[in-house]
Image (cartoon, helix red, strand yellow):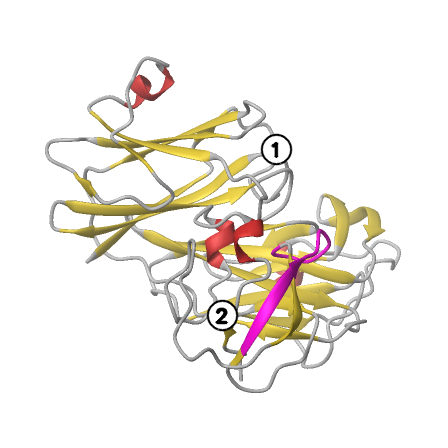
Amino acid sequence: MLWLFLIACQEPFGADRHDLVGYRIAAVEVALDGEVARPRAALVSEGRLWSDLPPQLGWYLLDDADAIADSGTVPDAISPSPTLSLGTARVLGLRATWPDGTERLATLDLRGIARTGIRPEAIQAQPLPVDLGEEALELGLEARRELVAEEGPLPTGGLLRLTPERVGGGDTVRWMATTGTFLELDDHVTDWAHGQLALEDGLVEDWAPASPGVVSFLALSLGAGAGRFRAADLWMGPADEPGTWVAGRWLPGEALVGPTWVTLSADDDAPSGLRIAGTVATPAEPPPGPCAAEGQALDLDVVLTGACARQELVGVPLLVEPDP
């Protein structure tokens, strides 16, 4: 099975590609099995990685990428994760339409797919020994290559080195976040400042640190026409509430130990728009899921990709498997 990948090839697109802001199709990946394609997209709704009313996703099999802009073009599927028979199509198109009428378009060239991109399993974050408020601090590429990452807590307003775990040696990793400033180091690794940082000739010109809290990231591993995305959260500064890590995402509310059945409630300040409301007894039979697989552990990607509206996950028994 091959995986294709798209990042930021959408219209209109005015923000920096690193910033998870506004309405965006942040990435598209497609599982290919012979001539059958199963695409999905990472979606940003008003700067959030979840939505109460996800966009309608129309997928198109096209001969020409420009055809996606024609409102008369009929989609081949309308679904967060359809199954498509490619046939002779040269381009995969996506039109995301939010309830307020906002539209975003994206296209992916299906030709010349060379190999598989590897999903990052996790993101390793380590602080770097610098004070961003220091006068005339040098942070050009060569200066940052000399910095050695440390172990320890992630400081508010600090500089981190982010490394994706398990990616292909020939892949390139692209990075996005809900806040902060990226200073990419090489094809895989990036430095990231927790705040708004401006450099002039490698020297810090302006620095505005961010407040403590959770930051959401998207790491996108892409090779020669192939790639996959991984969402992850980081607590900058000490966590000020209990919660549980689930596949690298932060789910506030309770600190769970081991697989646990819970109910969730809405929380606009949580990275996925959800928090643990409480634990419940193990159901005698797996409950029917409106958008998630029955009886399987909660995957918070379902709100990132629009497979679930947030409200579909509120108040129903769900199995949560905490990270070790």
In the image, 144 versus 56, the foreground residue is 56
Find disc 2 in the rendering and name its residue: 122
Find disc 1 in the rendering and name its residue: 15
Determine if residue 89 is in view. Answer: yes
Residue depicted at x 81% and y 62%: 212
Number of labels in the image equals: 2
Mark 1 neighbour class, 10 Å CA radius: few under 14, some 14 to 19, many 20 or more: few
Residue depicted at x 58% and y 56%: 217
User: Where 101 falls versus 19 (above or below)?
Assistant: above
Q: In the figure, is residue 19 to the left or right of 238? A: left
In the image, 105 versus 17, the foreground residue is 105
Locate residue 316, reporting x and y percent.
Answer: 54, 63
Locate residue 275, reporting x and y percent.
Answer: 66, 64
In reply to whether residue 264 is colored magenta, the answer given is: yes
Quick one: SS at disc 2? strand
User: What's the residue type where badge 1 is placed?
Assistant: Ala
Residue depicted at x 74% and y 57%: 194
Q: In the figure, is residue 10 to the left or right of 2? A: right
User: Where 83 falls versus 99 (above or below)?
Assistant: below
User: Quarter of the image holding residue 314?
Assistant: bottom right
User: Where 43 falls versus 238 (above or below)?
Assistant: above
Q: Residue furthest front?
A: 284
Q: Which mark is on residue 141? A: none
Locate residue 105, reporting x and y percent.
Answer: 43, 27
The magenta stretch spans which residues? Answer: 261-272
User: Where 93 falls versus 163 (above or below)?
Assistant: above
Disc 1 or 2, which lies upstream in sequence? 1
User: What's the residue type where badge 2 is placed?
Assistant: Ala
User: Quarter of the image holding residue 139?
Assistant: bottom right
Quick one: SS at disc 1? loop
Q: Which quadrant of the figure contains the N terminus?
A: bottom left
In reply to whether residue 179 is colored magenta, the answer given is: no
